[in-house]
Image (spheres, coloured by chain):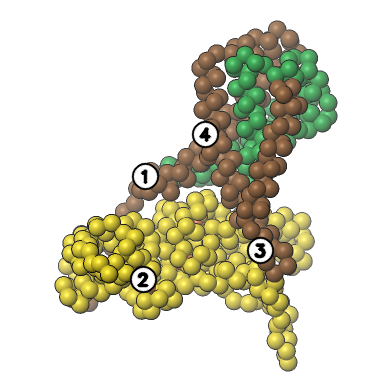
Amino acid sequence: MTIAKKAVVWGLFAAGGTLTSFVYPALIVLFLLTSMGMVPANLQFDQFYAFASSWVGKLCLFVVLFLSLWHAAHRLRVVVHDFGIRQDKLVARAVYTVASLGTVLTAFYLLTI
Amino acid sequence: MSRRPYVRPISKTTWFMRNGRYKIYVLRELTSFLVAFYSFYTICALAILASGSVEKWDSFITAQQCTGWAIFHAVALLYFLFFQTFPWFKLAPKAMPVQVGDKKLPDSYIIVGHYVAWIFISVFILWLAGAL
Amino acid sequence: MSTRNLELEVMRYDPEKDEAPYFQKYTVPCPEEWVILDALNYVRDELDTTLAFRWSCHMMVCGSCGMMVNGEPSLTCKTFIRDLPDKVRIEPLENFPIERDLIVVFDDVIQKLHKVQPYIMRKDAPPEDKEFTQTPAQLMKFKQLTMCINCMCCYAACPQYGLDNNFIGPAALALAHRYNLDNRDQGKSERLDILADYDGVWECSFVGACSEVCPKHVDPAAALQQMKVDGAVEYWKQKLGMTGEKK
Ligand code: SF4
Ligand code: SF4
Ligand code: FES
């Protein structure tokens, strides 16, 4: 017997859960303000582009999105299990593939900015 | 005397309807859809930003300005706070207990610490985005 | 001192006669300061001598009187009549096979308690002429976990155990954590290989139900989360060859 690989994704899940708990409420507020027509000043193209061009900006955006994606992926795997679909290996592969894809896309877009 | 233990059947798909505790748990787990949604939404925003076109960005921003989205975000915010952020803070001291000398640090200290940090971080993000 | 008529709906099952369990009703005049166990004893003494259930200490020590009281896993010697409505439904602990009436089969968990190696393991020989020392601070780290009386209420509350009983489950894992946290023990790494294997801690999704029903406030859910952290750390330690003995 050995420690299951789940240890790795659980680590990402826990880190991501902590991060989303702290960060997502503010993030959703930004979306809310935007949808109500009160677009925050630094979400205008030039300002946001400048932020995403800086290394600090890139790093922050990447870490937040990377961990959130893996948090969501792992929890979705459990949700599927809880709703009675017992295909854990398949489901795990599916959700983690999507999370990896999201991670790669994030890195790609950030690097092209 | 013959043994014939009886195994009660349980539903693999609707088990959580049996009590309130399980229902709240499932509601908590469903926040993962919100996290996935907002993550990919943000990635879309990055994609448009990366295209370098100001017009595309502006139309992306205007496309979101409708009551439907506003209601969605408002509901999502409340849902997220009550089923992810607050429960996560409440459970944090369980995963990471702190012992000082031969006494356990009361859970409430760790929880309050999380709330303080959360307010600080939220204000910082809103300030950074120019919303304050 | 007031007495109230309680309508007990008790699950019955006789393996020699019944295809499936059914409910039987008894009306019991209960003084408010009684516990459910007293009401069950009244039934057996005065109304129906065939009713089978386990108990021994009547004081929350032996852990044998766990049952579902109105759907909640409870020690019946700790569940007071004054806190209950007029109708009370009593069933054997959920997630376990029923042996007879309110008695369940615990074989599976007993096996799991053995499996987690709940004893002090040493890599070196124990000190010969002196005992292991332990300071109050070191004891505090796991003292709460030693309170477990193996009533198995936590297993009855745990949905993940109910759905898949390969999962080692709350009490056994909490017991293992008790030894992981003991400063005299050196077997944590070896134990984690079992605890953090596929059917171990990862099956727990932190519903927290086990801790809410535990009559001794052992808080198995907390122990499980801490073990997940340990498991994640140990995984990388083993991968990076930092444990010394394993590849
Ligand atoms: S952890 Fe609590 S509920 Fe579980 S067996 Fe021990 S005392 Fe009973
Ligand atoms: S916290 Fe884990 S062990 Fe406890 S009831 Fe929930 S799933 Fe079961
Ligand atoms: S009879 Fe011993 S714990 Fe209830």
Q: Give me the chain that's green.
A: A
Check if mark 4's residue and mark 1's residue have beta carbons within 8 Å: no
> Circle 4: is it few (<14), some (14-19), or many (20+) Cα within 10 Å?
some
For this rendering, which residue is in front, B62 or B78? B78
As drawn, the label of residue B17 is: 1
Element marked by disc 4: helix
| Subunit under mark 2 | C
Identify which residue is drawn at 63% across, 63% down. C192
Element marked by disc 1: helix
Q: What amino acid type is highlighted by mark number 2?
A: Cys
Query: Residues under labels 2 and 3: Cα distance?
Result: 30 Å
> Circle 2: is it few (<14), some (14-19), or many (20+) Cα within 10 Å?
many
Query: Residues under labels 4 and 1: Cα distance?
Result: 20 Å
What residue is disc 4 on? B79
What residue is disc 2 on? C77
Check if mark 2's residue and mark 3's residue have beta carbons within 8 Å: no
Query: Residues under labels 4 and 2: Cα distance?
Result: 39 Å
| Subunit under mark 1 | B
Residue C151 horizontal/vertical position (percent): 42, 69
Residue extending furthest toward the front: C1
Q: Is residue C20 left or right of residue A59?
A: left
| Subunit under mark 3 | B
Q: Nearer the viewer, mark 3 or mark 1?
A: 3
Residue B98 horizontal/vertical position (percent): 69, 59
